[in-house]
Amino acid sequence: MMQKSTSLSVPVLIVSLFLLTINHSPALAHEVAIPSHQIDITPNIESASPKTKALLKTLAETMFTSKILSGQNVGSANYLLQQNYEASVIELQQETGKIPAIFSVDYAWEVALDDYTQTNTILERHLNAGGIVTVSMHPGNPFLGGGLYTKGTGDYTFDDLFKPGTKPYIFWQTVLVKVADGLEKLQQNHTVLWRPLHEMNGAWFWWGGGDADQITHAEFKKLWLSIYTYFESRKLDNLLWVYSPNSHHDEGSTIDVLTLYPGDQYVDVVALDYYSDTFSLLNKNGSVDKLLSLNKPFGFAEFGQQSRSRMNNYDALNFLKNKFPQTGFVIYWHTNTDNFWPVPRSIIDNKKAKEFMNDPRVITLAELQ
């Protein structure tokens, strides 16, 4: 699935210093308990900057406090970005006086853009204020020229994606170049949580493996590595790589969250996408437990209800921190302002937004500062 600006410039390192002042909770309610020193906080990219290392450390430390980093998806660069951003963030600030600590955005819905200036302006303002940013992408099918929900390879094989001169190769390389160009603009002094090929264990995207006729583990790893290798050649050493499957609570459309895991050496952070009208299915089939077992910083990269009924933000907060206290962050999906997806998923569009954003357990942009 899918503020008033501030001139204060706060390095991400301040976040880590702030969190060190919080008392770590020795009691973990959930059965999976991982000592904080066992969480992997070494970025996979050896040339990672001090700020990138500090952010990874911050995400790990937050797991062992009573706190949670608040996040809001602000939309897609391709699709009503400014309008959706204002509805999800500006209105939230006006109502609650707070801005989420994390902004999430999509860089390439169907196609990659030639220019990410508008998107990066929003992200840089947030980063310069001490915030955290997550970037993902939803590229269209490179084999059939269709959208992200168009599955299959048609007359091509999967390996044609890596053969120079083929249509799939040209499409895929174009996406990688344009997305890397956009990320490169954010590189100076900033770290980005980069979340490619998310919900890969579902049956809805062309890169998903939830359908028996779709991508295999070996193919998915090759696809992931094609991004990793190209971005490495572009010296994008400000990225923390996020592996983000969908919750495996619907056996009809998802498979195990670790089936397509590309390997520890290519992942820095693990996160779960969860959409349901009940919280009770969140760890069905061990979705949370299995991601925690990887000993990586953990949180929810997408979070929201399934129906048009409004979620109670405060109930969600209590459930996450009581049942899964090692949740370091939660990022709500946005509400589309044109009703294409008429589900009110933004924090502001759900119940008790003010209580949620002002709860002492919730880290907002102000707390980062």
Image: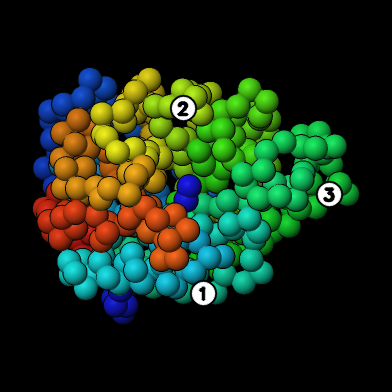
Label pair 2/3, CB-CB below 8 angstroms? no
Quadrant into which the C terminus falls: bottom left
Counting other residues with Cα less than 10 Å from the Cα at mark 3, is it few (<14), some (14-19), or many (20 or more)? some
- Residue kind at label 3, given as amino acid type: Lys
Residue drawn at point x = 51 percent, y = 41 percent: 198
Camera-nearest residue between 149 and 179: 149
| Horizontal relation, residue 63 to residue 139: left or right | left
Mark 1 = which residue?
118
Counting other residues with Cα less than 10 Å from the Cα at mark 2, is it few (<14), some (14-19), or many (20 or more)? many
- For residue 16, above or below residue 265: below
Q: Residue furthest right?
A: 165
N-terminal-most mark, 2 or 3: 3
- Residue kind at label 2, given as amino acid type: Val
Residue drawn at point x = 16 percent, y = 26 percent: 29
Mark 2 = which residue?
257
Dot 3: what SS?
A: helix
Residue drawn at point x = 56 percent, y = 42 percent: 197
Residue 261 screen position, x and y as percent: 53, 29
- For residue 250, above or below residue 312: above
N-terminal-most mark, 3 or 1: 1
- Residue kind at label 1, given as amino acid type: Gln
Counting other residues with Cα less than 10 Å from the Cα at mark 1, is it few (<14), some (14-19), or many (20 or more)? few
| Residue 281 seen in render | yes
| Horizontal relation, residue 224 to residue 31: left or right | right
N-terminal-most mark, 2 or 1: 1
Mark 3 = which residue?
167
Q: CA distance from mark 2 to mark 3?
A: 31 Å
Camera-nearest residue between 344 and 36: 344
Residue 274 screen position, x and y as percent: 37, 38
Residue 302 screen position, x and y as percent: 39, 46
